[in-house]
Image (cartoon, rainbow, N blue to C red):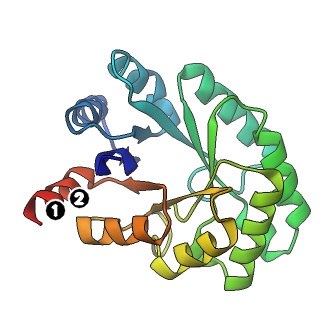
Amino acid sequence: MKFSKYIDHTLLATDAKKEDIIKLCEEAKEYDFYSVCVQPYYVSLAKECLKDSDIKVASVIGFPQGQNKTDTKLFEAVRAVHDGADELDIVINVAAVKNKDYDYIKNEMKVLKKTEAVLKFIIETCLLTRDEIEKICEIALEIEVDFLKTSTGFSKSGADLEDVKLMKSILGDKVKIKASGGIGDYEKAKSFVDAGASRLGASKGIQILEGIKNE
């Protein structure tokens, strides 16, 4: 597979303008990324920009803290799919994890699976213990979600290679892994793919691909 197809070309900045999203989509077509990932406000625009391509549109739900109630996330998810999102990156409720309210996490995953989209649940690994990561992985296997994603990129740190290796050891090939947050060069990106990530979230996708040329 082309390395570009591992990458969700991402722009989630609060101050991103319409022209920035249009540029993001043009770059995605030029470099043949798997998808663009944008805020819900820009899903319709991105879908229109990419209508003559095979590039997917992803959006974020409950972003970036994840503590919206489940029915609020479901409303967001349904609306994003209506606007044209093919994939949804959904932040789990880390507070529920810290409270060991794992039934809440299970129920939320079940409810959100009702949406007709590929779902990537963001678990914010930098805020979790090893045991908590293992528990979420076990729940993901039970609910049969599409992806677990390491990070929002808006917390204290992003993807960690050892966390991805841990996730892969539990998830195997049954639930895919998306590594995101702080991946800005080819060497780092490749290390995550080698560790088991099937997708990478990156705002520096072009820089990552330029690294391949340099090698």
Q: CA distance from mark 1 to mark 2?
A: 5 Å
Query: Local crowd at mark 1 within 10 Å, few (<14), some, or many (≥20)?
Result: some
Measured from the top left, where is residue 167 in percent x and y?
62, 72
In the image, residue 24 sits, relative to residue 6, either above or below, namely above
Q: Nearer the viewer, residue 113 or 92?
A: 113
Quarter-of-image position of residue 49? top left
For the view shown, which residue lies furthest in the right direction?
Answer: 103
Whether tag 1 and tag 2 are in contact, CB under 8 A, the answer is: yes
**19 with respect to 52 (left or right):** left
Please state, as top left, top right, bottom left or bottom right, where the C terminus lies in the image. Answer: bottom left
Residue 192 in the image: above or below residue 18: below
Residue that sits furthest to the left in the current view: 214
Q: Is residue 150 left or right of residue 50?
A: right
Q: Which residue is mark 1?
A: 211
In percent of the image, x 48 and y 62: which residue is there?
A: 197
Q: Which quadrant of the view contains residue 86?
A: top right
Give the amino acid type for the residue marked by disc 2 in the picture.
Answer: Ile
Q: Secondary structure at mark 2?
A: helix
Give the SS element for disc 1: helix
The residue lying at 53 percent from left, 73 percent from top is 164
The answer to which image quadrant residue 87 occupies is: top right
Task: Find residue 9 and name its label.
Answer: none
Is residue 135 visible in the rendered image? The answer is yes
**Vertical arrangement, residue 94 with respect to residue 83, above or below:** below
Residue at 52%, 64% in the rendered image: 151
Residue at the disc numbered 2: 208
Coordinates of residue 71 in the picture (x, y in percent): 81, 39
Q: Amino acid at mark 1?
A: Gly
